[in-house]
Amino acid sequence: MPVERVLPDPDAEALIALTREIAVEELKPVASSYEADGRFPREQFGLLGRSGLLGLPYDEKWGGAGIGYEVYLQVLEEIAAAWMTVGVGLSVHTMSCYALAVAGTDEQREEWLPEMLGGDLLGAYALSEPQAGSDAAALSARAERDGSDYVVTGTKAWITHAGVADFYTMMVRTSDDRSRGISCLLAPADTPRLRVAPAEHKMGLTGSPTAQLLLEGARIPARRLIGAEGDGLRLALDALNSGRLGIAACAVGLAQAALDEAVAWARQRRQFGREIIEFQGLEFMLADMAAGVESARATYLEAARRRDRGLPFRRQASIAKLVATDTAMKVTTDAVQVLGGYGYTRDFPVERYMREAKVPQIFEGTNQIQRMVIARDLKNS
């Protein structure tokens, strides 16, 4: 059943209605077949771009919509409830545009941002490396200045959209300073000597390719440096704070989809002469699932409202990401239980939801890292 939302104005209500229409009519009907085939939904991202949904939180001057995170995240939730791959992809694309939008020069933004926000160019965010995941400051991919270019050598890992993106917002090392030696380059996907390794074989989100980027002396024009040399780690971590809210919203959408499937099944499945939703063991499980979903939604919305008002929100973003993704894992697992043996088969989507719920606990900073961020903030407050 559709989520009842308290939205700030009629424009937001119209945006959610448009999103819900696209989600129900264009995304949900094909999600299972695309995921089964491992097929990337590029045409669906094009539809989102044409509908104005790929640049929602960015300035209208550059082709965005100037929408606050309170509304943008609810758009993400609606999309993820229909198809998690597309929801996560939209969140990743939004994060990939962040550095250019906040730290690029007006000339850089005029040249590249309208196509990125309008859906002509799809982005990927390249921070992690094989030996630098949670410890982002340990990255070693090196960029050496050579005339009007940077020559980049190294490997980036776990890159969502690798091989299908048109650009990579890439963090590279330009000096040996651990935290201030990292810079941000906006690398075109067709850069010579930038190769994409074979895609990882994943348990979920199989419609979204994840792979390593192999940089073998790739030459990236120096005019594609975003911000100053040494700004990269700060930009990366700032983007992650907002990206964690995106993943929280996607996780809530996934959990809501699982809850809806479980309730629908419990209403129509009969055992011992009555619907199984009448049995206390099942109704209490469903009640706990609903409480988890609504609590997680409230948590990410509170963090979003703080962000929209210019208040500190890093701790709240980590709490939202932690709570929402742990909730999604529990709710999707319980949905499989509600459906019983049927839930374990691919004839119903809940087994896919359960597989997809695992990785949000890992990417954009593992949930163990979120606990470290929260605890550190408490100690320093």
Image: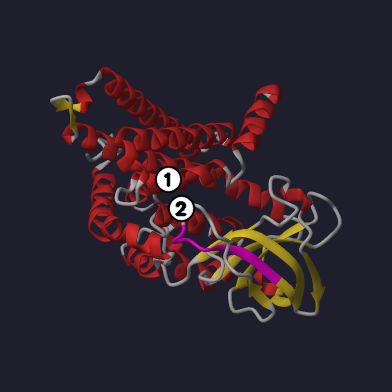
Q: Is residue 90 magenta?
A: no
Vertical relation: 91 (above or below) 269: below
Residue 248 shows in the view: yes
Q: Which mark is residue 250?
A: 1
Among the two numbered marks 2 and 1 on one chain, the one whose residue lies closer to the N terminus: 2
Measured as percent of width and height from the top left, residue 93 is found at: 49, 59
Is 212 inside the magenta-drawn segment? yes
User: Which image quadrant: the C terminus?
Assistant: top right
Residue at 30% from the left image edge and 61% from the top image edge? 30
- Say which amino acid is labelled 1: Cys
Give the quarter of the image for residue 227.
bottom right
Quarter of the picture holding the N terminus: top left
Pick the front one: 75 or 98: 75
Quadrant of residue 129 within the rendered picture: bottom right
Left or right side of 288 for 313: right
Colouring scheme applied when the structure was drawn: secondary structure
* Observer-nearest of 354 and 187: 354
Q: Secondary structure at mark 1?
A: helix
Q: Which residues are magenta?
A: 206-214
Nearer to the camera, 342 or 88: 342
Q: Residue furthest right?
A: 176
The answer to whether mark 2 and mark 1 are in CB contact below 8 A is yes
The residue depicted at 33 percent of the width and 28 percent of the height is: 290
Identify the disc placed on residue 88: 2
Where is residue 271 drawn, in percent x and y?
19, 28
